[in-house]
Image (spheres, rainbow, N blue to C red):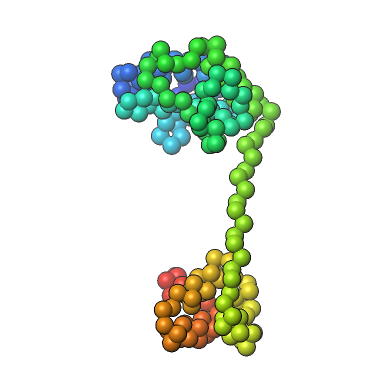
Amino acid sequence: MPAKSPAVDAYIAKSADFAKPILKKLRALFHKACPQLSETMKWNFPHFEYKGIVGSMAAFKQHVSFGFWKASLMNDPEGLLEGVRNTTMAAKRVTSVDDLPADGTLLAYIREAVRLNEEGIKVPAKRKKAAKPVTVPSDLLAALKKNKKAQTTFDGFSPSHQREYVEWITEAKQESTRQKRLVTTIEWLAEGKPRHWKYRK
């Protein structure tokens, strides 16, 4: 017997009438493709798991969507995943059972999603963009050279913390304001304080 969840039963029961037969069919196909699947509710809609998330389905006001967690790694001979392959979780929208791909097609897609989990294949992590180096104005550089404590604090800050001070100084509209901020910056840095230290608990 497939491991069906009462929470998924309730989800289907509460869905719009047009959505119920679509959800029931999708659910049956997921279990047919992999009898070992279990069901769970994540983010308020049903997910199917086997050694990790395989796929999901969700009912909306005017359509039902279903998709595969590792869609970006899957073959897509029928073009079901087109237009959404740049995301990890691709989803197809349908408004009636007739809109669903043929059973054999869906079973093949589900089985491939299961295979990816069985083989432990993971979606490559997105590379974080390297933070742009902070361009420190010459007057701040000169002031830092004269104060070792301030220099040490500034050098130890992350680029974002450094940028907060740099922007505060360079955004001053008047030279007198800039000079005041520069003096305050050195004082605070010498005390080991980040730019917005006043707002931190």
Q: Position of residue 87 (x, y in %)?
A: 53, 36
Which residue lies at the image location 39% right of the left edge and 24% below the top edge? 64
* Residue 86, placed above or below residue 170: above
Q: The C terminus lies in which quarter of the figure?
A: bottom left
For residue 55, say whether it is visible.
Answer: no
Q: How many marks?
A: 0
Q: Nearer the viewer, residue 188 or 8?
A: 188
Q: Quadrant of residue 23?
A: top left
* Residue 170, placed above or below residue 158: below
Which residue lies at the image location 64% right of the left edge and 85% below the top edge? 145
Left or right of 102: which side holds 108? Answer: right
Q: Position of residue 135 (x, y in %)?
A: 59, 71
* Residue 67, placed above or below residue 28: below
Q: Position of residue 175 (x, y in %)?
A: 45, 85
Q: Residue furthest right?
A: 119
Which residue lies at the image location 40% right of the left edge and 21% below the top edge? 94
* Residue 201, placed above or below residue 118: below
Q: Position of residue 108 (x, y in %)?
A: 59, 16
For residue 121, say whether it is visible.
Answer: yes
Q: Nearer the viewer, residue 180 or 174?
A: 174
Q: Nearer the viewer, residue 110 or 71?
A: 71
Q: Nearer the viewer, residue 10 or 180?
A: 180
